[in-house]
Image (spheres, helix red, strand yellow):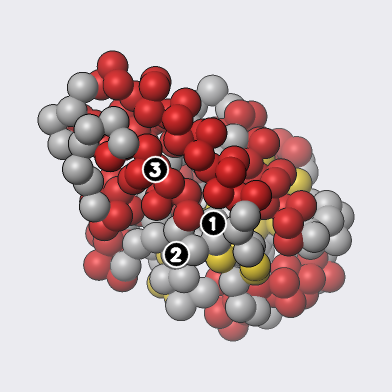
Amino acid sequence: MNTIELLVLDMAGTTIDEDNVVYKTLMNAVNDYGYNVSLNEVLSSCAGKEKFDAIETLLEEINGKKEDAEAIFKDFSEKLKIAYQNLDVKPISGVENFLLKVRSAGKKVVLNTGYSSEIAQQLIKKLGWKENVHFDALITADDVTASRPNPDMIFLAMKKFGIDDAKKVLKAGDSAIDIEEGRNAGCGMIIGVLSGAQNRNELEKAKPDYIFECISDAENILF
């Protein structure tokens, strides 16, 4: 039915339910520095971005001081480690079966994220997911020089598995940044999901090919 060989899937909000703890922690770190931002503002501005870039962008939008970003990012990173230690992380409903089905059909699955490698590995460990069982590779913001919406993480995923045509790649995520990343890479299929950070209106602005409640709904177009 289609020629998709590689799925590049965002982590938090797309495959993993971590209750928006990243954005709640980011909001607290910014507000602890004397600002006053809401969770909705943080989700709208920061979803999907590498987190230092996200803080810089947010400060710019609220007329804050860009030079505060470094200290806020450091505080955020420390707070997040503690938050994740105490967090009950679980897969989004239907995702584990979806991953197993996709891989058993011979397609590759790459998890990609704007998180650091350390945080991403912590999430995967909590889930008990195994490389070569649930996914084929993990690519994080630490692995590339330019963060999303730059398509470097997708290109790296393609290189890892010898795929030279982006039309064979499906990119899915819960933020407009994910969709832009897929568009910039020239992916053959781009999916927005409503299981995470942003709502339908925000995703529609980025013009994905499909918007689903969750990524497991993509079974209908893959098989």
Q: Residue at x 40, y 50 (%)?
A: 23
Between 40 and 193, the residue placed more toward the observer is 40
In this picture, residue 215 sits left or right of residue 71 = right
Which SS class for mark 1? loop
Whichever of callouts 2 and 3 sits on the residue coming sooner in the sequence is 3
Q: Residue at x 21, y 22 (%)?
A: 65
The amino acid at mark 3 is: Leu
Q: Pointers 2 and 1 in contact (CB under 8 A)?
A: yes
Q: Pointer 1: residues within 10 angstroms few (<14), some, or many (20+)? A: many
Between 183 and 211, the residue placed more toward the observer is 211
> Closer to the observer: label 1 or label 3?
3
State the separation of the CA atoms marked 2 and 1.
7 Å
Which SS class for mark 2? loop
| Percent coordinates x, y for residue 174 in the rendering | 44, 60
The amino acid at mark 1 is: Ala
The amino acid at mark 2 is: Gly
| Percent coordinates x, y for residue 223 in the rendering | 68, 79
Q: Which quadrant holds residue 64?
A: top left
Dot 3 corresponds to which residue? 26
In the rendered image, the vertical position of residue 32 relative to residue 46, given as above or below: above
Dot 2 corresponds to which residue? 196
Q: Which quadrant holds residue 71?
A: top left
Q: Residue at x 79, y 71 (%)?
A: 100
Which SS class for mark 3? helix
Whichever of callouts 1 and 3 sits on the residue coming sooner in the sequence is 1
Q: Quadrant of the N terminus?
A: bottom right
Q: Pointers 1 and 3 in contact (CB under 8 A)?
A: no
**Residue 45: mark in rendering:** none
> Closer to the observer: label 2 or label 3?
3
Dot 1 corresponds to which residue? 12
